Image (spheres, rainbow, N blue to C red):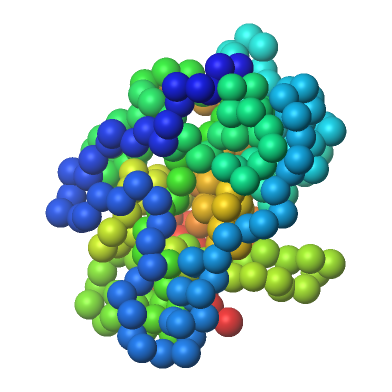
Amino acid sequence: MENSEIEFNDDYEHPDNVEYILESVLMPSDGSLEFNLLAEEYNSILLNQCRCNTEACENIETCTHGGQYEMKPKEKELTLKKLKINTVRPIIECNDLCGCSKNSCLNRLVQYGPRKNLEVFHSPKYRSHGLRTKVNIPSGAFICEYAGELLTVSEAKKRLEENQKLGLMNYILVLNEYSNEKKQQVTIVDPSRRGNIGRYLNHSCDPNCQIGAVRIDCPIPKLGIFAARDIVAQEELCFHYGGEGQSKNINEGKACLCAAANCTGFMPNTSIE
C-alpha cells in the first residue's frame, strides 16, 4: 500500500449555509472549568506510539496499535475487520510519533480524510438533504468523519433546549465509551454550525453505516463512519442515531421516515446524562 503521496483530503462542501470544517474543533470558549478541561484534553497528544519497523506494520496483527483493519485484496483498500457482533471496537491509528513508515503502514485510514465519490443530494425518502455514494463501497470501508464542534455537557444541554424550543433540527451526537460496562469517556459533537458532510447522513432503523471511535494523536476520538455492509452505487448512507455507544432515547414526538421493516416508527432522541 503506497501512502507516500496521501495527505488529508476533503474537497467536499456544504449546500447549506454552514461553515465547512475538515475535522472536529472546539466550541467557542465560555470561560467555564468544564470548557478548560475539554480544551486541555483537545490540545493533548497521545504518547503511546507504536515502535514497529516497516515489516511489522505491514502485518498489523503484530502492531501494538493494529488489529482492527485488514486489507481487502479485491478492492485494494483497508476496511474494518468483520466482527461477530455488529459493533466497532475503539481504534488507535498509527501517527507521526510512531516508528513505522507511512509508505507501508496498514494502520492509517481515517487520518487521510473521507472517501471520494460521495455526494449530497435531496433525499425523497427523508424529504431533506442526504448523503449517497456514486460507487460501490465494501463492508467495513471508511466513509467519513462525523465532524463538528466538540461540546461540553453543559453546552450540549443548552443547545438541545434551544433546538427544541425553536423547532430546529438536532445534529448533536453523543458517543459513550465503556470499559467493563463502566462509562469511561463521553464525546459530544454538534455539526449544526460548523461541520462536514457527515452531518447529511440520515437515521435508519436498519442502517448501512455505523459509528466508531478512532484515535490518532489526540485523547478525544474522531467519530468515524464505516460501512456496516456492502453498499451499492447510488444507495443513500444512513446510520442509527441511537446505535452502539450513542446516547439516544426514542422520541415519540417525531416520526421516523426510514421505512425499514424493523422501523420503530419514531426517531431516537438525544439524551445526556
Residue 18 percent across, percent down from the top left: 20, 55
Looking at the picture, does residue 14 appear above or below residue 155?
above
Decide which of 7, 24 is in the foreground and name it: 7
Q: Going by the image, does 178 lie left or right of 198?
A: right
Q: Is residue 64 visible?
A: yes
Q: Residue drawn at (75%, 29%), measured in percent from left and top?
A: 53
Q: Residue drawn at (26%, 63%), measured in percent from left and top?
A: 193
Q: Residue furthest top?
A: 74
Q: Is residue 247 visible?
A: no
Residue 145 percent across, percent down from the top left: 46, 46
Q: Residue furthest bottom?
A: 32
Decide which of 63, 226 is in the foreground and name it: 63
Q: Residue drawn at (38%, 61%), measured in percent from left and top?
A: 25
In the rendered view of the protein, which quadrant contains the N terminus?
A: top right
Q: Residue drawn at (70%, 71%), measured in percent from left and top?
A: 184
Quadrant of res 141: top right
Quadrant of res 134: top left
Decide which of 109, 239 is in the foreground and name it: 109
Q: Going by the image, does 263 lie left or right of 180?
A: left
In the rendered view of the protein, which quadrant contains the C terminus?
A: bottom right
Residue 166 percent across, percent down from the top left: 22, 77
Residue 135 percent across, percent down from the top left: 42, 18
- How many labels were placed on the picture? 0
Q: Residue furthest left?
A: 17
Looking at the picture, does residue 80 appear above or below residue 166?
above
